[in-house]
Amino acid sequence: MTLTLRPGTADDAAECGRICYEAFSGIAEEHAFPPDIPSPEVGVALIEGALTHPGFYGVVAELDGRIVGSNFLDERSAVVGVGPVTVDPATQNSGVGRRLMRDVMDRAAERGAPGIRLLQTGYHNRSFSLYVGLGFVHRATMACVQGPPIRRAMPGYPVREATDADLGPCNDVCRQVHGVDRGGEVADALKQGTALVVEREGRVTGYATDLAFFAHAVGETTPDLQALIAAAPQFGGPGILVPTEDSALLKWCLSNGLKVVQLMSLMTIGLYNRPDGAYLPSILY
């Protein structure tokens, strides 16, 4: 049988979305964890969003003309994020995932991206081994936490909806913490109306594109992120990703009723600056 890769199109959303749901749910059920993608409809919507967004690169794998997987590269910022990479359960462990990963890595190299990042599910040993074999380095462990919204204001850390005028200050905070900005994602969040900022003494000291699985947040200090988390009306998807090394933030989340759902690994190739501040990655990075 012949495996071919081609650019993804909007017409691929239904089949790739089905595979995305079945792949994630199958692995989760195998390990007795709740699935990251709760339904086929969510899988289709997720894949359709990536296939139709100009800031994403998508690749589809076909085996003798039948779609068997897909992968994506978030190119909205200088450092690129991988995923979701999914392979039809009937075709897994046959090299398709490696080919899909090699394709997006080649794409990143062609674009001159200084770094590539991804989040890997902690209970999926096969994917961890694949990424290490491809050259990814484990950087940090993340706790995915979920629970009822805290809905509490923190004195001295007012949180408000972000406006277009906040794009520059948000990028400044991100560069201060990570060494690079994620302005493309912030711009999308501003359009969607999900972005929040936290201020101290009238200055933006942190932001969140949302408090959700597919969103990220950055703050100069841990209390900046605590204020953003406390102000969230809900935590979208499986939850938010909290670095386990930020023990103060993780303990605070647990003391406020949130619970750890699963652990994940942040993995990188190329440019990586150890964060100088507080952050929540998205599932992409």
Image: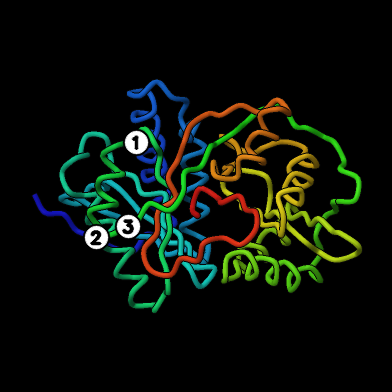
Q: Residue at x 36, y 43 (%)?
A: 15
Residue position marked by numbered label 3 in the rendering: 136
Which sits in the foreground, 262 or 81?
262
| Residue 91 image point, x, y percent | 20, 39
Pick whichever of labels 1 and 3 is earlier in the sequence.
1
Disc 2, SS: strand
Q: CA distance from mark 2 to mark 3?
A: 22 Å
Q: Residue at x 81, y 55 (%)?
A: 198
Residue position marked by numbered label 2 in the rendering: 5
Q: CA distance from mark 1 to mark 3?
A: 22 Å
Residue position marked by numbered label 1 in the rendering: 23
- Relative horizontal placement of residue 126, taking residue 179 as reference (left or right): left
Residue neighbourhood size for the residue with mark 2, other residues' Cα within 10 Å, grouped as few (<14), some (14–19), many (≥20) = some
Instruction: Look at the image and name its color scheme.
Output: rainbow
Pick whichever of labels 2 and 3 is earlier in the sequence.
2
Between marks 1 and 3 in the image, the one whose residue lies nearer the viewer: 3
| Residue 268 image point, x, y percent | 40, 59
